[in-house]
Amino acid sequence: MVISCGGFWAGAGNGPRGPARIHVSRGVISRIEMLEKSREDTFIIPAFVDAHCHFTWNGLRNIFPDLGKVRSSGELLEVVAESAKFGDAGYVIRGYGFDETGWKEPVLPSPEELDEVSRGRPVLLYRVCGHKALVNSGLMAMLPAGAPGLDRSTGTISEGIVFGLDELVPYERGILETACGNATDAAWKAGVTAVCTFESLSAAEVVSGWREGIKTTVCLYGEEVRKHPGNGMIEEVSGLKFFLDGSIGAETAAMRTPYADGGIREPLMSREDVAEALEFSRKLGLTPVFHGIGGRALHLLAQACRGHDGPDFVRVEHAEEFKAIRTDAWDTSVHRFVMQPNFVNNWQLEGGMYERKLGRDAASFLNPFRTVSDGGLSLAFGSDCMPFGPLQGLPGATGHPDPGERLSVDEALDAYTLRAADVCGFTGLSRELSEGRVADFVILSGSPFEKPWSDLEVLVTVSDGKVVYAADSFSEGAYG
């Protein structure tokens, strides 16, 4: 296969380069031939790597109702009522991705209102962050007495048992396999050829057996593994995830900044808990991955890691209130940060959810990509599936509302390609585009160094030298 392009980006520090032909043979780049000029407007970059996603979750959203467009309690009830028309009486009505913080009246329906429209069926609806769910009486009857995080009066679950619902209310294997297919198609369409996904034990078994071309590394939830220490999946995964806190939208993140109501949330783990998690991960030979959004949670992690003879490195996910503690509290040889630029677009712009929850000054303080990078710390990007798709997230990295926290296009691309591959263990993808590198790359409709992200489209995705996605607007005659 030979593909001509109007320009390409090989990796960090190189900047955009001119017209070229990319020669591919047996799954690797065999030659990059520079040209004096080209008729093509297209631009080639290494394929994207999503360093933090929920692969099956993203696929399930195409099977069950996607609640991301719901704008009121009434609309949410309408979706449930429509879903109740299909399926058996005991079949669980599921939905994913509601975000009440964007509603004119952010009031969730009651369990009684859900019961009224669900025709006697259990209802389980996940908030966009995954840290909160809404259920009716039928679903509550399936949960154990004293289920942590469950408020039976409101039908909401915050933290606690919300992360054990896959075990208590399992999916059929066929549904998970269909979800993997959906998620693979979505990844290729977005220009992503490799992901690090966070899964329950049951879902991880299906994902690890999925052999449809998407490169996948799986992290399990640490507390679930502790309950099932003999599970054979341990040999198939790369890391264990532990929750230091929750989310800003659910008001469960352990922020240094008080919430609008004056509330302060404490971390979900103690310093001793973190030390135990580090040791547990070390014994299993897995990377410890800590979900930490608020400054209180991040301070706890930094302190607990000092002097600990643990794994080679520790992943820190999200770190939205990173600037609440000193940069030198982190060890550049140990801590690696995976952040989400799409959070900026979703919630950090003027009048957004961050501002409503924390105030304008505190909102501008969050997601400090430049501070992390300039501190000499490893920075990679992932989507957390809110939403999935690098081109939807990258504007948040280069257009951060605080100009001092913006990354260059070169740095932002690096975080979503080579750096993301490195932190996830995809060694072959962490190399810049060059002869001998595995042929995973993307053809864009133009150069991100010249056009805004919103004007760009993924035209072609190549994985292991094979075209796995081609937009309808792209002629097959352009490659061969």
Image: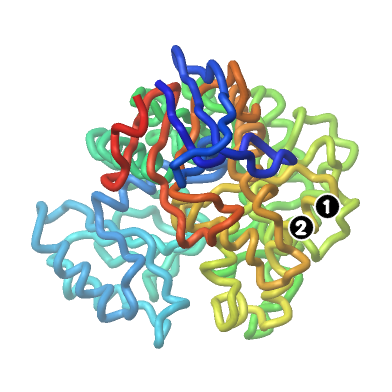
Residue pictured at 25% horizontal, 54% vertical: 64
Which quadrant holds residue 19? Answer: top right
**Disc ID at residue 374:** 1
In this picture, residue 165 sits left or right of residue 224: left
Q: Secondary structure at mark 1?
A: helix
Q: Residue furthest top?
A: 26
Q: Position of residue 468 (x, y in %)?
A: 34, 31
Residue for point 88% across, 51% down: 329
**Which amino acid, by three-letter code, is at mark 2?**
Arg
- Relative depth, front residue between 288 and 456: 456
Quadrant hosting residue 355:
bottom right
Locate residue 49, reporting x and y percent.
Answer: 54, 38
Q: Nearer the viewer, residue 203 or 468?
A: 468
Image color mode: rainbow
| Residue located 67% across and 48% down the image | 410
Is residue 388 visible in the rendered image? The answer is: yes
96 left or right of 312 in image? left
Disc 2 + disc 1, Cβ < 8 Å: yes
Residue type at mark 1: give it: Asp
Circle 2 — which element? helix
Q: Quadrant of the C terminus?
A: top left
219 vs 475, nearest the viewer? 475
The residue identified by callout 2 is 370
Quarter location, residue 125 = bottom left
